[in-house]
């Protein structure tokens, strides 16, 4: 229950269940604390997460394990406490693996800290030189700063190491058939209708405050072309398919194999308000419940 509430962005309910558990005299273990710390991370509950982490040894005599440290680093990183997260990693009694450093690298993308990102990336590539995701993340950070030569350098590094970028795909089920979409995908039989609907939504979206986040386009192209590239991300295509094929008021459920990008997150919030639908997106980290212009994650993911 603690973990389930957490991935749905209901961290306070996770804490309620955790406290109910303690009142019932059920002793927590490492797994319990991994779940509650992860829940705090998904909901941005920094102070509550810190208290839970400190209580492991202080109140329950439990020495934090690697997973517990990983959750705490993730919480600090997502909350913008990058220096504190780095300090925690450096002072851990166990050696951090690439995934823990990767949490901090992801936060560098969110908060635009290029200097720290470069330093962390060097450490990550020492530990895991063939992981495509970390290369792509570093490339994204350079692209957001318009450092196109560095973007190309990272891409060449990926080629030399034989690492392949994982294609972002979004899936939606309709009439017991799973429909798959990639970015700017025109292979679907209803592509013309899907693209027309997205084009029609742009005007209302902008009137409600949508501003394309062109930093999420990883190519050195004109701004207008960047806006067009963002419009046809896989999750938007899947949602448009759902809008076309399901009755008004029907919730739309989409699964994505990667983390939803910031532009799609902003766009889907506004789309949910325009079409008056609940839109649920399950990305590789959590569930996002969009309704009436808001997301269950509170824009914290």
Image (spheres, grey):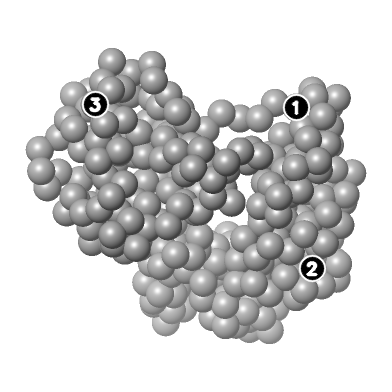
Label pair 3/1, CB-CB below 8 angstroms: no
Residue 121 drawn at (x, y percent): 82, 50
Q: Nearer the viewer, mark 2 or mark 3?
A: 3
What residue sits 84% from the left and 32% below the top?
157
The N terminus sits in image quarter? bottom left
Residue 215 drawn at (x, y percent): 59, 51
Indicate left or right for 164 with 228 as reference: right
Residue 109 drawn at (x, y percent): 66, 57
Q: Nearer the viewer, mark 1 or mark 2?
A: 1
Q: Is residue 63 visible?
A: no
What residue sits 25% from the left and 41% below the top?
200
Numbered label attached to residue 163: 1
249 or 287, nearer to the observer = 249
Pointer 2 residue: 86
Label pair 1/2, CB-CB below 8 angstroms: no
N-terminal-most mark, 1 or 2: 2
- Does dot 2 land on a helix, a strand or a loop? helix
Indicate left or right for 240 with 62 as reference: left
N-terminal-most mark, 2 or 3: 2
Numbered label attached to residue 193: 3
Q: Residue 81 lies in what quarter of the image?
A: bottom right
Q: Is residue 72 above or below residue 231?
A: below
Label pair 2/3, CB-CB below 8 angstroms: no
Numbered label attached to residue 236: none
């Amino acid at each position: 229950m603690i973990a389930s509430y957490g991935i749905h962005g209901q961290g306070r309910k996770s804490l309620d269940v955790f406290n109910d558990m303690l009142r019932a005299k059920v002793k927590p273990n490492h797994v319990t604390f991994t779940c509650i710390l992860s829940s705090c991370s998904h909901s941005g509950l920094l102070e509550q997460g810190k208290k839970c982490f400190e209580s492991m040894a202080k109140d329950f005599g439990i020495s934090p394990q690697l997973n517990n440290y990983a959750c705490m680093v993730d919480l600090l990183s997502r909350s913008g406490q990058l220096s504190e997260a780095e300090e925690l990693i450096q002072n851990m009694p166990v050696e951090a693996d690439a995934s823990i450093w990767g949490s901090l690298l992801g936060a560098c993308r969110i908060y635009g800290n290029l200097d720290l990102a470069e330093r962390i990336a060097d450490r990550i590539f020492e530990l895991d030189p063939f992981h495509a995701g970390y290369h792509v993340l570093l490339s994204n950070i350079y692209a957001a700063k318009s450092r196109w030569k560095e973007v190309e350098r990272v891409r060449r590094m990926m080629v030399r190491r034989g690492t392949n970028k994982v294609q972002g795909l979004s899936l939606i089920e309709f009439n017991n058939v799973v429909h798959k979409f990639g970015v700017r995908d025109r292979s679907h039989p209803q592509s013309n209708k899907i693209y027309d609907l997205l084009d029609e939504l742009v005007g209302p979206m902008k009137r409600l405050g949508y501003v394309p986040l062109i930093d999420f386009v990883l190519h050195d192209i004109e701004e207008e072309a960047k806006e067009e590239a963002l419009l046809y991300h896989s999750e938007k295509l899947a949602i448009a398919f759902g809008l076309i094929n399901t009755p008004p008021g029907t919730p739309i459920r989409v699964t994505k194999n990667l983390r939803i990008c910031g532009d799609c997150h902003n766009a889907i919030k506004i789309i949910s308000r325009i079409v008056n639908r609940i839109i649920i997106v399950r990305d590789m980290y959590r569930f996002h419940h969009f309704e009436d212009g808001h997301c269950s994650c509170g824009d914290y993911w």
